[in-house]
Amino acid sequence: MRVAADPGLYDPENPLPTLHGSRCDACGTTFFPPLGIGCEICGAGAEGLRAVPLAAAGTLHSLATVYVHAGEDIEAPFTVAEVQLDDGPLIRGLMSEPATIDAIGSRVAAQWAELRTDADGNDVVEPRFRIEDRGDAGGGAA
Ligand SMILES: [Zn+2]
């Protein structure tokens, strides 16, 4: 089975990644990661925040590709992206493969990436964004 690399942020049971967000009843702002102590926009208390699932899909807002990385958790090159989710928040995540600046404005959606297998034989997963559709339309689908 799948287990989340970061269980607080997404639910590995779903076939496609769904993020754990929170929404403020008072001002309607949606947050990711979910807030616990109260709304940072209007100051409403924690009782005014509701857990909401956020679809891991939106528009590629900006990106940075890392070519040299000392950690062993991920192999360079890889692309860190900011994605404007359809459900509201601007979030940061990883692309499934390195992307270039011309991809900005494209539709992206996350799929599960298997990072490793844990001691119990479970697949440890996290969402990675993939380009669904080029923002400039025309000449893309080769
Ligand atoms: Zn609020």
Image (cartoon, rainbow, N blue to C red):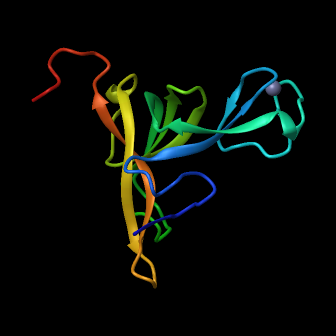
Image coordinates of residue 63 in percent, x first then y, are 46, 36
Q: Residue at x 83, y 33 (%)?
A: 48
Q: Nearer the viewer, residue 53 or 72?
A: 53
Residue at the outermost left position: 142
Q: Name the quarter where the N terminus is drawn.
A: bottom left
Residue 27 falls in image quadrant: top right
Q: Residue at x 35, y 25 (%)?
A: 106
Residue 134 falls in image quadrant: top left
Disc tally is 0
Q: Residue at x 69, y 43 (%)?
A: 34
Using the rendered image of the protein, determine whether residue 76 is visible from the camera's viewpoint: no
Q: Quadrant of ligand 1?
A: top right
Q: Nearer the viewer, residue 38 or 66?
A: 38
From this view, report whether residue 58 is shown above or below residue 118. Answer: above
Image coordinates of residue 131 in percent, x first then y, are 31, 35
From this view, report whether residue 5 is shown above or below residue 52. Answer: below
Residue at the outermost bottom position: 119
From this view, report whether residue 135 is shown above or below residue 47. Answer: above
Q: Residue at x 34, y 49 (%)?
A: 96
Q: Name the quarter where the C terminus is drawn.
A: top left
Image coordinates of residue 80 in percent, x first then y, are 47, 45
Q: Nearer the viewer, residue 116 or 80?
A: 116
Image coordinates of residue 113 in percent, x first then y, are 37, 57
